[in-house]
Amino acid sequence: MLINNILVLGSKPESKLPDLQVDKIYTANGAAERSIHFRKKYLKNELTCIVGAREFVRNELVSERIIAAKPDRIFIRAGKITLPSSLEQNTKLMCLRNLDQWNFQSKFFQKKKFSLLLAELQYQDKFYNKIFHLLRSIKNKSIQGVSTGFYAILLALEENPNSNIIISGIGMKGGKQFYKSNRSNYFVYDSRARVDRFLINRLLKKYKYRLFTLDKDLIQVANINKWNGNSF
């Protein structure tokens, strides 16, 4: 029996927030900023911010949003960072190697690691580029798998086995980075979004039935449950 609600936030613009108390919030990269808005109305929850090490170190617009959100946990999915001094007292830092975060993903999908390998082929369009990308990723032990937004969903599923997972701001349709920055002028997520779309449709049913979303894009892409509650 599902007894509580967990919120996962991405940065897709104009996405609504569910108007209800949740026990935990998981955010991807700069979506930590949206948790601040939500917590002005619903304060009593645990906040976990998920981000890649390079994104945190190199993209100030992401790290500034995470620091401002004052999370209970920062979850680094590939690499290590130093916890900012302003967060040392109240924030727990967890860092995974790239291989560890890749292994974590595999249990959620049909055919496990084989599905992750097939998904990584979707990163490129042309056949030669697909093979080159996959072989290079294997050689460098740098197969990312899902995007950080999708990873936040998986982490929420894993840590809250008896909960509804409500998703806002994750569409899996690609495009430019949703929050404005110099980087967002040229960096697009079409390639990683193709990987996400491939894998969301191979998510095991025991996980998929617990997912609800406020975003039409994700309903169209993944055929998951629509959230029908109030929103703001």
Image: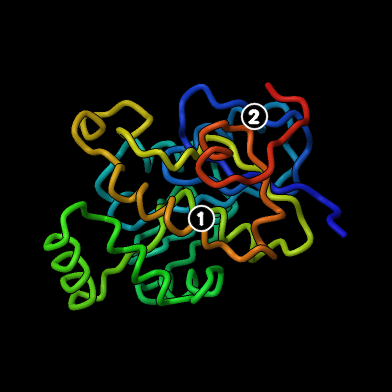
**Residue beneath the point at 37% across and 43% down:** 63
Amino acid carrying label 2: it is Leu
Work out which quarter of the rendered image holds the C terminus and state it: top right
Which image quarter: residue 95?
bottom left
Judging by the rendered image, the residue that carries numbered circle 1 is 200
Q: Residue 189 bears which disc, if any?
A: none
Q: Sequence-wise, which precedes: disc 1 or disc 2?
A: 2
Q: Residue at x 41, y 63 (%)?
A: 77
**Mark 2 falls on what kind of element?**
loop
Which one is nearer the viewer's eye here, 148 or 125? 125
Q: Position of residue 136 (x, y in %)?
A: 16, 71
User: Extreme front residue here?
Assistant: 127
Q: Is residue 231 above or below residue 30?
A: above
Residue at 48% across / 38% down in the picture?
171
Amino acid found under the numbered disc labelled 1: Ile
Res 17 label = 2
Residue 101: give x, y in percent of width and height.
Answer: 43, 70
Q: Quadrant of the N terminus?
A: bottom right
x, y (%) of residue 229?
78, 30
> Which x, y percent locates residue 128?
11, 63
